[in-house]
C-alpha cells in the first residue's frame, strides 16, 4: 500500500520548511511546528494522507488565514493599530451592525442567503479561479464557473442555479510578444480561452450569463483574474443543514482522477514560468455531468432524502468530509471511491479536486430511494462511509487506517498569525489641468474635431470602457426565460446596460437585480477609495435600473498580491476599512465573499516581480418587487430632458481621462456616503413613481462617456450644456466637468411633462438639467463659458466604442 | 380534459422549465419526462398528444448537436415513436430539439421516410451566439404556426444552427411548402449576417414534415411569452403576449379540437 510516513518528529526548522515546500503544502514554519507538536504527543509521524489533509484544511484558500490573522498596521503619522482580524473587524462587523432581517445566512454556508418571496430565498456567491486560468485559460475558467455553481448547489440543501456573472482582468490584448514575461501566455490568448471556457460551461449548464465586466492592465499579464459568480433559488424550508451520527457519506457525480491535486495549496503560491509544470493542479470540467447532478439533487432535495450537502472544491473529499463532519466525526473508506483510472495513491484519491462531485449526508433508510433517483438521472452515487460521534476523522484504505485525526485539531489547531502591514500613500505626478486640456495628445487626424471630442472618443475606445458585445453574445443570457433586462439594451440591442434583472419564477414579476463594481485604477492612489468606489458603483448600477438600497446585499471578492509583503497587506487593510465604512453607511450588508491572495508573477529571466493591482470586486444583488418598473440606460425620445444627478468634484485621479493623457494623478474619487445615500434613495423613488425614462450611472469617463453611451444606445442625439452641472467650487475647467469620475452620480432622461414632478421628488439633491435629446444624430456639448467643446455624431461615438473588440 | 404534453428531457436538456411554463400558460397538462422513463416503459408516449423536445445540449452535443438523443429515440424508442407519429399527434423540437428531430430523420421526413435528409451545421460565424432575430412566417400547413403574424421576433442561442441539405432535398422542402420560418432582415432586403445568424440555406429557421404535425425551429419561442421578455420593452409599445406564445397555443388548440 502506497502510504508513507513523513518523518517530521525529529526534523529541524530547515527540514520542516523543506518538507512543506517540496510537498507543495504551502504551510509556513509556524504551522509545520504546530503539526510537529501534535504528532509528538501521539508519539508517531503523520502519514502523507494526514499531512496533506491538514495542509488542505489549513490552506489560505480554505481557511482565509490572512483575513483572520492579527494585523499590526502602521500608517505614516498615526499610531500603530492592532487589528483583530480583517474579516471580523471590517466585513462581518459591518453586516452585524446593519442587522438586516432579510439576511437568512451570512458567511457560514457555501453562499450567502437572502429572502426573495414568500416561498423562496436567493443565494449568491462569487469565486475566483485565477491561478488555474493563468496556466490553462479554457479549463481554468470553465471549472471556475463549474465550481461556483456547485457552491449554490451546496448551500442549504441545494439551490437551483439561475444566473451567472463573470468578471475578468487581463493584460493588454495588444501586448507585443517581446514584452511578454517568460512563461506567461499572451493576454489575448488568455482572454479568448477564458471566454470560451465560461461560455461552454455556462451555456451547457443552461444558466444565463448576464452580468460582468472585463478590465485590462499590464500588471494582469502573468496573473489574470477570473471571477465567477452564481445566483441560486432555494425553497425557504431547505436552507438549514445538519449531520447526525450514523448518516451515510454519499458521493454524487463524477469520478475521481489525478486532476486538480494541490489546487488549494497551489493558489497560495506565486506564479512563474515553472508553474505550468505542476501539471495536475488544473481540473478538467464536464458541464453535462454537473447538469445531471443538479437534476438529480433537486429531485432528492424536494423529497427530503438528505440532511446535508456540500461540494467537493479545493481539497476534494478531504475538505468536504472534514467540514461536514466537524461537529460529529467521520469514517471513510477510500477504496469505495469510484476512480477514472487505477493507480492513484490513497492521498491522491483523498485530495483530488476532480470536478462535478458533491457529498451528501443521508439517513440509511433513504438510501434506496436516493440511489433510484440517481440511476434514473444516469448519475453515479456511492456510499463512502458514515458520520460518527467520535469527533475524529478516520480514513481507511483496504481495511487499513491511513489517517486518524482529531477534528478539533484539524479545524482549530491552526496557529493564529500576526502579520505586519504598512500603508504609505504613493505620490504620482499631478498634471496641470489646463496643460492637459490644451496641449497633450492633440491628434492631427481630424482637424475639424475639438480636443475634447477626440478625448471622449478615445475614452470610449479604451479597452475597459469599449463594448464587450463580442463576448456577451457568446453567452446564452436568455435561457430559463426569465431575463427582463438584458446585458445589452437600446434601439439596436447593443448599448451597455448597467445591471441585469431576472425573474426566476416565470409568471411572477418579482425579480433579482445583479450588478458589480470594480475599479483598480483608483487603488494605485489609495485602495481605500478604490474599494469605496467599487461599492458605490455596484449600488449605482442597482439603483440605475430601478433597484433600491432597502434590500441590496453585497459580496466582497479581494484579489491581492502576496500578503506577506508589508505594502500589499497595508493596501488590503485600507480596502477592508472602506468596506466597513461604506457598507454600514449605505446599509447594505455583506453576505459572502472570498479572497484570492498571492497573485504575483515572477519573470525568471529578469527577476522582476509583477504584482497585480489590488483588485476588489463588489457584487450587488437586490430584490425588486415589480420588474415592470425597471428602466434601461438608452435614451427614448427626442425633446426629453437630460439631468445630471449628484455633485461633480475635482476628482480625475485614476480616471480614464488621465489614463489617456498618460497620468494617474492623486485625486481619486471619494465616496461621500451620506450624500450618496440621499441621492440614491431619491432617485429610487423617482424611478418607482415612473418619472424617469432612462438612467445611467456615471463611472469611467464621467458625464461625457455616460451621456454619449445613453445617446448612441438610444439612437438619438443630445444637445447639452455644462452650465447647470452641479459642482464643487474646485471644479473650474471643462475637462473636469466632462470626465471627472466622482461617485454617486447619474444621468437621467425625463419627459418634459414630468419634469416638475421629477424635480420635486429630487428636492434637496444636487441636480441640473443639462440639455435635450434630439432627433438628429448630433452630439453637441457646450462649455460653461467658451462655446462648443464637443461636436460629433452618435455614429462616430458608437464606432469608437464598438471598434476596439470587433474580433 | 386538458391536452397532455410530454416534455422530453435527458442529460444536458436545459430549456425544459420554460418550455413547460409555455405549455402550461396555454392550458396544457405537462409532464417533464426523462428519456430513461420512456425507455424503461414507465411512461407511455401514447398517453400524450403533444411531445416537445426542448433546447439544451443533450449529452453535451458530443459527436454532433443532438445526435446521441436522436439515436436513442431511433433505436430505443423505435416502435413507440412510429406509433406516435403515425397516430397523427404533434411533435415540436426547439433548438437542440430541432437538431434532434433532423438527426432522427423526423424532419423534413420527405416522402414520409424516416431517414436523415438534412443537417444543422456549425454557424458560419464559427461561434455560439445569442441574439434576437426577425422571422418571416411562411405559408405552410404547419399546425403550430397557423394564423401567426407574418413577422415574429424571437431570440436564437446556438452554435450549430445552419440548416443545410443537398440541393434536391432543399428543392423538395420548398416545393412541398415545408419551410415554416425564414430569417428576415431587420431593414428590408435579403437577410445578411447577423439577421441570418447562422448562414442557413434559403435562410431557413424552421421546417415541418409533410403532415405539418412535426415541427422544428432554431429560435426559442418559449423565451418570448410576455412583453417583459422583449429586449426593448422599456422603449417600445408592445402587446402583452409575446410572439412565441401563439405557437404553443396553436398546438394545444389543435389537440383540444380533435378530442
Image: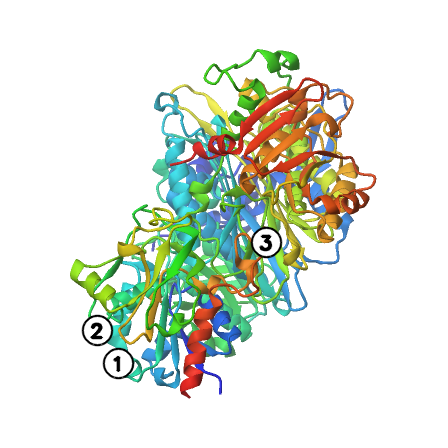
Seen in the image, is B3 located left or right of residue A532?
A: left
Residue lying furthest left: B168
Query: Could you tell whether A649 is left or right of A305 in the image?
Result: right
> Camera-side residue: B122 or B70?
B122
Residue at 43% over, 35% down = A805
Q: Is mark 2 on a helix, strand or loop?
A: loop
Q: Same chain, marks 2 and 3?
A: no
Q: In which quarter of the image is the N terminus of chain A?
A: bottom left
Q: Is residue A261 visible?
A: no
Q: Residue B82 carries which label?
A: 1
Provide the chain ID for the residue under circle 1.
Answer: B
Question: Can I make out residue B59 in this image?
Answer: yes
Disc marking residue A124: 3
Location of mark 2 (residue):
B114
Verify CB contact (< 8 Å) between mark 1 and mark 2.
yes
Q: Residue at point 42% right, 41% down?
A: A470
Would residue A760 appear left or right of A710 to someone viewing this image?
Answer: right
Distance of mark 3 from mark 1, alpha carbons?
A: 46 Å
Amino acid at each position: 500500500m502506497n502510504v508513507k510516513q513523513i518523518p517530521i518528529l525529529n526534523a529541524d526548522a530547515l527540514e520542516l520548511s523543506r518538507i512543506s515546500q517540496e510537498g507543495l503544502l504551502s504551510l509556513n514554519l509556524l504551522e509545520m511546528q504546530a503539526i510537529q507538536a501534535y504528532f509528538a504527543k501521539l508519539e508517531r509521524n503523520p502519514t502523507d494522507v494526514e499531512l496533506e489533509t491538514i495542509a488542505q484544511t489549513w490552506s489560505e484558500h480554505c481557511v482565509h488565514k490572512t483575513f483572520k490573522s492579527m494585523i499590526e498596521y502602521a500608517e505614516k503619522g498615526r499610531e500603530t493599530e492592532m487589528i483583530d482580524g480583517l474579516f471580523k473587524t471590517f466585513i462581518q462587523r459591518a453586516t452585524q451592525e446593519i442587522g438586516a432581517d432579510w439576511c437568512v445566512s451570512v458567511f457560514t454556508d457555501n453562499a450567502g442567503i437572502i429572502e426573495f418571496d414568500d416561498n423562496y430565498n436567493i443565494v449568491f456567491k462569487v469565486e475566483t479561479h485565477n491561478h488555474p486560468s493563468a496556466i490553462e485559460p479554457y479549463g481554468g475558467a470553465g471549472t471556475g464557473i463549474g465550481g461556483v455553481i456547485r457552491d449554490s448547489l451546496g448551500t442549504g440543501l441545494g439551490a437551483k442555479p439561475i444566473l451567472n456573472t463573470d468578471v475578468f482582468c487581463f493584460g493588454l490584448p495588444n501586448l507585443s510578444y517581446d514584452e511578454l514575461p517568460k512563461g506567461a501566455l499572451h493576454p489575448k490568448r488568455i482572454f479568448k480561452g477564458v471566454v470560451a471556457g465560461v461560455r461552454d460551461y455556462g451555456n451547457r449548464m443552461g444558466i444565463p450569463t448576464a452580468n460582468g465586466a472585463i478590465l485590462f492592465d499590464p500588471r494582469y499579464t502573468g496573473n489574470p483574474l477570473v471571477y465567477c459568480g452564481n445566483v441560486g433559488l432555494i425553497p425557504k424550508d431547505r436552507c438549514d443543514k445538519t449531520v447526525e451520527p450514523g448518516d451515510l457519506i454519499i458521493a454524487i457525480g463524477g469520478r475521481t482522477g489525478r486532476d486538480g491535486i494541490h489546487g488549494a495549496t497551489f493558489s497560495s503560491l506565486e506564479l512563474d514560468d515553472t508553474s505550468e509544470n505542476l501539471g495536475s493542479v488544473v481540473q478538467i470540467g464536464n458541464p453535462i455531468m454537473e447538469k445531471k447532478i443538479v437534476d438529480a439533487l433537486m429531485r432528492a432535495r424536494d423529497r427530503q432524502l438528505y440532511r446535508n450537502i456540500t461540494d467537493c472544491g479545493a481539497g476534494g473529499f478531504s475538505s468536504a468530509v472534514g467540514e461536514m463532519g466537524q461537529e460529529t466525526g467521520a469514517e471513510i473508506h477510500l477504496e469505495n471511491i469510484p476512480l477514472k483510472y487505477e493507480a492513484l495513491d490513497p492521498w491522491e484519491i483523498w485530495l483530488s479536486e476532480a470536478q462535478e462531485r458533491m457529498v451528501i449526508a443521508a439517513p440509511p433508510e433513504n438510501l434506496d430511494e436516493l440511489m433510484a433517483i440517481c440511476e434514473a438521472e444516469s448519475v453515479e452515487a456511492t456510499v463512502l462511509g458514515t458520520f460518527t460521534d467520535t469527533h475524529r476523522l478516520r480514513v481507511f484504505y483496504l481495511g487499513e487506517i491511513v489517517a486518524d485525526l482529531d477534528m478539533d485539531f484539524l479545524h482549530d489547531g491552526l496557529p493564529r498569525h500576526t502579520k505586519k502591514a504598512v500603508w504609505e500613500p504613493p505620490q504620482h505626478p499631478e498634471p496641470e489641468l489646463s496643460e492637459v486640456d490644451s496641449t497633450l495628445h492633440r491628434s492631427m487626424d481630424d482637424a475639424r474635431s475639438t480636443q475634447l471630442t477626440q478625448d471622449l472618443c478615445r475614452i470610449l475606445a479604451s479597452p475597459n470602457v469599449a463594448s464587450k458585445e463580442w463576448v456577451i453574445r457568446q453567452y446564452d443570457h436568455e435561457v430559463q426565460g426569465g431575463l427582463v433586462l438584458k446585458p445589452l439594451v437600446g434601439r439596436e440591442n447593443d448599448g451597455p446596460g448597467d445591471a441585469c434583472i431576472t425573474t426566476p419564477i416565470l409568471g411572477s414579476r418579482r425579480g433579482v437585480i445583479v450588478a458589480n463594481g470594480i475599479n483598480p485604477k483608483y487603488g494605485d492612489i489609495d485602495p481605500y477609495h478604490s474599494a469605496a468606489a467599487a461599492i458605490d458603483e455596484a449600488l449605482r448600477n442597482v439603483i440605475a435600473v430601478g433597484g433600491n438600497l432597502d434590500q441590496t446585499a453585497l459580496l466582497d471578492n479581494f484579489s491581492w498580491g502576496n500578503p506577506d509583503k508589508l505594502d500589499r497587506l497595508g493596501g488590503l487593510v485600507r480596502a477592508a476599512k472602506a468596506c466597513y465604512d461604506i457598507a454600514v453607511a449605505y446599509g447594505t450588508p455583506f453576505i459572502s465573499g472570498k479572497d484570492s491572495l498571492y497573485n504575483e508573477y515572477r519573470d525568471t529571466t529578469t527577476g522582476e516581480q509583477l504584482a497585480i493591482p489590488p483588485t476588489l470586486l463588489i457584487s450587488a444583488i437586490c430584490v425588486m418587487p415589480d420588474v415592470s418598473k425597471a428602466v434601461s440606460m438608452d435614451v427614448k425620445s427626442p425633446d426629453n430632458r437630460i439631468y445630471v444627478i449628484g455633485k461633480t468634484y475635482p476628482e480625475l485621479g485614476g480616471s480614464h481621462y488621465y489614463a489617456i493623457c498618460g497620468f494617474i494623478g492623486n485625486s481619486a474619487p471619494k465616496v461621500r456616503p451620506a450624500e450618496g445615500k440621499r441621492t440614491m434613495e431619491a432617485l429610487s423613488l423617482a424611478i418607482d413613481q415612473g418619472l424617469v425614462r432612462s438612467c445611467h450611472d456615471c463611472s469611467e469617463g464621467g458625464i461625457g462617456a455616460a451621456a454619449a453611451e445613453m445617446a448612441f444606445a438610444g439612437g438619438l442625439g443630445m444637445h447639452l450644456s455644462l452650465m447647470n452641472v452641479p459642482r464643487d467650487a474646485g471644479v473650474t475647467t471643462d475637462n473636469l466637468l466632462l470626465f471627472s469620475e466622482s461617485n454617486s452620480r447619474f444621468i437621467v432622461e425625463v419627459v418634459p411633462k414630468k419634469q416638475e414632478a421629477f424635480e420635486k421628488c429630487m428636492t434637496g439633491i444636487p441636480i441640473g438639467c443639462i440639455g435635450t435629446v434630439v432627433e438628429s444624430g448630433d452630439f453637441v456639448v457646450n462649455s460653461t463659458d467658451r462655446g462648443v467643446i464637443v461636436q460629433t455624431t452618435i455614429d462616430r461615438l458608437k464606432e469608437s466604442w464598438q471598434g476596439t473588440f470587433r474580433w | 380534459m386538458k391536452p397532455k404534453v410530454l416534455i422530453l428531457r435527458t442529460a444536458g436538456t436545459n430549456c425544459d422549465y420554460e418550455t413547460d411554463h409555455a405549455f402550461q400558460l396555454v392550458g396544457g397538462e405537462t409532464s417533464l419526462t426523462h428519456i430513461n422513463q420512456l425507455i424503461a416503459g414507465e411512461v407511455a408516449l401514447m398517453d400524450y398528444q403533444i411531445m416537445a423536445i426542448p433546447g439544451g445540449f443533450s449529452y453535451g452535443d458530443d459527436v454532433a448537436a443532438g445526435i446521441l438523443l436522436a439515436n436513442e429515440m431511433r433505436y430505443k424508442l423505435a416502435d413507440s415513436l412510429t406509433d406516435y407519429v403515425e397516430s397523427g399527434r404533434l411533435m415540436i423540437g426547439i433548438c437542440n430539439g430541432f437538431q434532434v428531430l433532423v438527426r432522427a430523420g423526423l424532419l423534413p421526413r420527405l416522402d414520409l421516410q424516416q431517414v436523415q435528409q438534412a443537417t444543422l451545421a456549425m454557424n458560419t460565424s464559427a461561434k455560439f451566439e445569442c441574439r434576437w432575430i426577425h422571422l418571416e412566417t411562411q405559408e405552410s400547413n404547419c399546425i403550430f404556426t397557423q394564423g401567426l403574424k407574418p413577422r415574429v421576433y424571437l431570440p436564437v442561442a446556438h452554435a450549430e444552427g445552419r440548416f443545410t441539405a443537398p440541393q434536391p432535398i432543399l428543392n423538395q422542402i420548398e416545393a412541398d411548402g415545408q419551410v415554416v420560418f425564414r430569417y428576415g432582415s431587420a431593414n428590408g432586403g435579403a437577410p445578411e449576417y447577423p439577421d441570418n445568424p447562422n448562414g442557413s440555406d434559403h435562410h431557413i429557421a424552421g421546417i415541418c414534415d409533410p403532415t405539418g404535425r412535426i415541427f422544428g425551429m432554431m429560435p426559442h419561442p418559449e423565451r418570448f411569452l410576455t412583453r417583459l421578455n422583449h429586449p426593448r420593452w422599456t422603449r417600445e409599445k408592445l402587446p402583452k403576449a409575446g410572439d412565441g406564445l401563439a405557437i404553443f397555443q396553436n398546438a394545444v388548440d389543435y389537440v383540444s379540437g380533435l378530442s
